[in-house]
Image: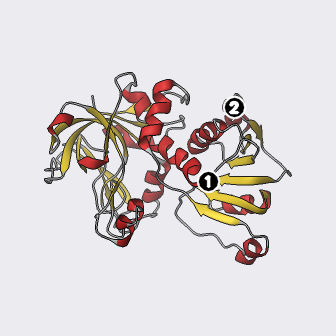
Amino acid sequence: MKALYYDNQEKSARYLEDYEIPTPKPCESLIKILVSAICNTDKEILKGYKPDFCGVLGHEFVGSVIDSNNKELIGKRVVGEINESCGECIYCKTGREHHCINRKVIGITDKDGCFAEYMTIDTKLLHIVPDEIPSEVAIYTEPLAAALEIIEQAHIKPSDTVAVLGDGRLSYMISQAVSLTGADLTVVGRHEEKLEQFKSFSKTTTNTTDTFEIVIDATGSPTGILLAQKLVRKKGLIVIKSTYAGTVEIDMSYFVVNEITIMGSRCGPFKPALQLLKRGLVTLPPIDLYELKDYKKALESRSFKSGFRFI
């Protein structure tokens, strides 16, 4: 089958046409990929973000179930969560499966991803896509779920002042999700032309001296936490959504003295994301799709979202 394989020794991706079609384990389903999308995490892996990973990249997909231990799923169009947990460790037994000590993460840790014609996935991670949602829209389920995780973790009140840092794809989804709470929302970005798309549901600025109760870093940059430090109020909350290769040096005593909470946020709930997409409460630009062999063009695309079509 066709696949985009990441070689961690060469820190580069290779397009293959003879990669072996995977065989599902007893607890897994075999998925024929219809559409898959590039995430910033994929680009960071190519920069060395996950030095131990070697295999097929990609974790955002819409696919059709070819075979499964759950026969009712065969033929269904699905999306899938990315964390496969062991069910036995302390985190699995205390309701924190996303932090399983032995977890596999498709396209990121110990598990081939979806930049291929077929993939296998633990059946319990699958969610059926409603007929009303086109595959090109359903492809946003995983990143939108990640945006919704912020609202799951932090109680954002309509009276709160909230800043989202960044004017890219992740920020756009987070900002729409936060806007549904009724909070006083400001998006802080660097590009006036990108900020235009935010103006229907938030205030925007490229430079602010205002401070906020909650600051969400969606910049994808090591400098995001430093800007968040400047903008968050004392006893406020910083939510870190960015993942990137590299480190940043910060003065932790500042956060202690000013009693600022720092919260990491990662994967989120799929069912609410599918509901929002079905009802049109979150709207997103069309994805720019390529043949897998044209992966370099897809990775370099400056469109809102790019990915691969397998149909």
Pick whichever of labels 1 and 2 is earlier in the sequence.
1
Amino acid carrying label 2: it is Phe
Relative to 185, 74 lies left or right? left
Residue ID for mark 1? 154
Whether residue 300 is visible, yes or no, is: no
Q: Residue furthest top?
A: 132
Residue at position x 13%, y 50% from top?
Answer: 23
User: Could you say which quadrant of the image residue 220 lies in?
Assistant: bottom right
Amino acid carrying label 1: it is Ala
Percent of width and height locating residue 55: 28, 57
Say which element carries label 1. Answer: loop
Relative to 2, 250 lies left or right? right
Quarter of the image containing the C terminus?
top left
Q: Which mark is residue 118?
A: none
Near-viewer residue (119 or 52): 119
Depicted 160 relative to depicted 279: above or below: below
Near-viewer residue (299 or 123): 123
Binning the other alpha carbons within 10 Å of mark 1 as few (below 14), some (14 to 19) or many (20 upward) gives few
User: Could you say which quadrant of the image residue 225 lies in?
Assistant: bottom right
Q: How many marks?
A: 2
Percent of width and height locating residue 308: 36, 36
Percent of width and height locating residue 189: 71, 45
Q: CA distance from mark 1 to mark 2?
A: 20 Å
Q: Residue furthest right?
A: 209
Whether residue 261 is visible, yes or no, is: yes
Q: Residue furthest front?
A: 94
Residue ID for mark 2? 201
Say which element carries label 2. Answer: loop
For the residues labelled 1 and 2, say whether their Cβ atoms are less than 8 Å apart. no
Residue at position x 55%, y 28% from top?
Answer: 283
User: Could you say which quadrant of the image residue 69 lies in?
Assistant: top left
